[in-house]
Image: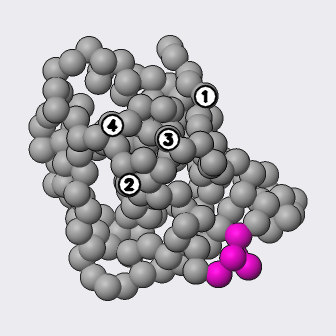
Amino acid sequence: MAIHDVLKMGDPRLLAPARPVADFASLELAQLIVDMHDTMRALNGAGLAAPQIGVSLQVVIFEVNVNPLQPNPRYPEVEPVPFTVLINPVLTPLSDMMEEGWEGCLSVPGMRGLVPRYTELRYQGFDATGQPIDRSVSGFHARVVQHEVDHLNGVLYPMRIRNLRDFGYTETLFPGQHLQDD
């Protein structure tokens, strides 16, 4: 089990576009996915992108509330999102409808912001073994995918906030609630 430090906003590595994965059979890719999973779980994350742990590859993982006996403490009310390894992703909005929702990030600890995201999208890419993935999703699942894929393009959620009045410290915005970072 390898739990990595997560890079914080301000680190220039978070702003660089990630490189596509070319070798799906490499031991380095397999280890990266294990390390990302261990790190995400240890920090109660809903998702994690490889650049967040300093690896400039187009790899994201996400999972929320698949075990009803252990819901994610930050998002106990959202629908389950299955554990997914998504490599070299391509996102296609399925409508022009966008919705604002509160987001946090392990790379922006202690803060939350109201971020507009497409409500429905199709994501395509590959799983850990190089098999194609093609899913159409909506709701929180769509939000998580967009948030994580943004990291592959050097975009952090505060860059998407329309009004900075909707951005602040979690403890101030949500007093008395024990929310953690994404």
**Which of label 2 and label 1 is nearer to you?**
2
- Above or below for 123 versus 166: above
Residue at the image position 23 percent from the left and 41 percent from the top: 20
- Please provide percent x and percent y for residue 141: 40, 59
Q: Which element type, helix, strand or loop, lies under badge 2?
A: loop
| Residues packed near mark 2 inside 10 Å, few (<14), some (14 to 19) or many (20 plus) | some
Of callouts 1 and 4, the N-terminal one: 1
Tell me what residue is drawn at x 38 percent, y 75 percent.
119
Query: Do the numbered discs 1 and 3 sit on residues whose CB atoms are within 8 Å?
Result: no
Q: Earlier in the sequence, mark 2 or mark 3?
A: 3
Residue 137 to residue 14: above or below: below
* Residue at image mark 3: 13
Q: Are marks 4 and 3 in contact (CB under 8 Å)?
A: no
Residue, disc 2: 153
Say whether disc 4 or disc 2 marks the residue closer to the N-terminus: 4
Residue 171 versus residue 75: which sits nearer the camera?
A: 171
- Alpha carbon of mark 1 to alpha carbon of mark 3: how far? 13 Å
- Give the amino acid at mark 4: Leu
**Mark 2: which amino acid?**
Asn
Can residue 71 be seen here? The reply is no
Between 54 and 16, the one nearer to me in the picture: 16
Q: Which mark is residue 5?
A: 1
Tag nearer the camera, 2 or 3: 3
